[in-house]
Image (spheres, helix red, strand yellow):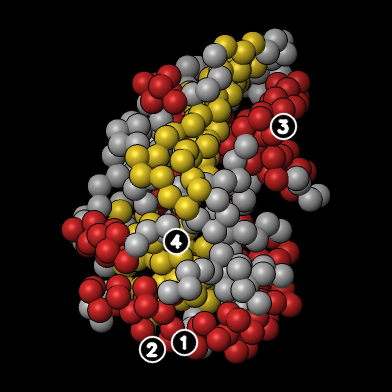
Amino acid sequence: MGFVTNAEILPISFPLAKPFSNHVRPVTHIQGMVVKLTTDSGIVGQGFIYGLSNIVPAEIIPHIKDIMQIVFEECEETHNANQLMSYWNQRWHDYRSTKCPAPQLYALAVIDIAMWDVFTKANDISLHAFLGGHLSKIPAYGTTGWLSLSVPELIKECLFYKRKGINAFKLRLGSPDDYARVKAIRTAMGDDFVLTVDANQRYSVEQAASIAKELSVFNITWIEEPTANTLPSIEAIRKISSLPIALGENIIEKSDFEAICEKKLTDYLQLDLPRCAGITGFCEIAKIALQHNIPLCSHLMYELSIGLVAAFPNGHLLEYDNLLPPDIFAESFPVDQGYLYPSKAPGNGATLTEAALQKYQTACYQLTPEKKIRCSL
């Protein structure tokens, strides 16, 4: 038997205290996945991902089982965390050498995050410190400017973040009253308030350029995903947009990130942990952004992203929300004058408590080297 003796696969579902609508559908729950890896020395590594609409546990779980069975079969002679991580790094790159379907990508991500948790805990170091720990803190922006919110509700959200010292907010575009909504927030919050807008790829290049020009009078820091995430569309809007551009959360392939960074097609790069296939992919792309002096931001999952964004010298902004239930993590994530601080404890810095897992898991699959899979509800 190798170093990892057991894997638990836990689909989870968090009900929202305040349901909202995004550009796709109403959102009432946050779906997620947890993988727990237990080692023969008693270390437990936890991987955790979630999303607003793209995490579908029933599609991801078979891929997690398949990958973990291969890990068990091939790691019988793996006896410590360093050996395991060396093996996993090669296996991860083997998977990413070909295009992965989304469920497999997310399976890789949650396992990869758990592997990094095992590795850093075994080496008694935080993920942030192991990766270089270049920045001690990262400023945040509030991200709950949903289309379903009225103007008074949007301003209330801005004030919620302002009370935490967060002087930045992102508004979703797609309302017939976009201009009036942006104007109302700018008027209510003042000229020094950082305001960004997110188009969620909904516009043609011409429409996006027109909207960017119209909104440029409000000192907008960026327009996010103004058009389709194809290189021709990105190149076209880059040439004519009146606003700086942010993108990256829906880019999948490393080659596309390389082209975007080399050609400076974005002013800010936003990385999504699940779509990066985990910490390994996040770090590879962050290094590309650093090479080309592009500021690094995160997409959702601030709990895990703090240590990653702050690990790089070009770490810039952290997307911050109030979506998940309170007190579900073993760690706390206080905001101090608008900044969040990476964990100094060994591990990846974000661990769901056993109480939270018991409360919010929808199933539990146990996988051992003997390939005996058991499920309990």
User: Which residue of the protein is positioned furthest toward the front in this rendering?
Assistant: 176
* Numbered label attached to residue 217: 2
Counting from the top left corner in percent of width and height, residue 361 is at 49, 24
Mark 4 secondary-structure assignment = loop
Question: Mark 2 against mark 3, which lies toward the viewer?
Answer: 2
**Badge 2: how crowded within 10 Å, few (<14), some, or many (20+)?**
few
Which secondary structure lies at badge 2? helix
Residue closest to the far right: 98
Q: Give amino acid for label 1.
A: Glu
- As measured in the structure, the alpha-carbon distance from the residue carrying label 2 to the one carrying label 4 is 21 Å
Q: Position of residue 192 (x, y in %)?
A: 25, 78
Residue 152, relative to residue 28: is it above or below? below
Give the residue pinned by disc 4: 147
Say which residue label 3 marks: 63
Q: Earlier in the sequence, mark 4 or mark 3?
A: 3
Determine which quarter of the picture holds residue 67: top right
Contact, CB < 8 Å: mark 4 with mark 3? Answer: no
Q: In this view, does 280 lie above or below 218?
A: above
Residue contact between numbered discs 2 and 4, judged by CB atoms under 8 Å: no
The answer to whether the residue labelled 2 contacts the one labelled 3, judged by CB atoms less than 8 Å apart, is: no
Q: Determine whether 190 is above or below 129 in the image.
A: below
Residue at mark 1 to residue at mark 3: CA–CA distance: 45 Å
- Is the residue under label 1 in contact with that under label 2 (CB below 8 Å)? yes
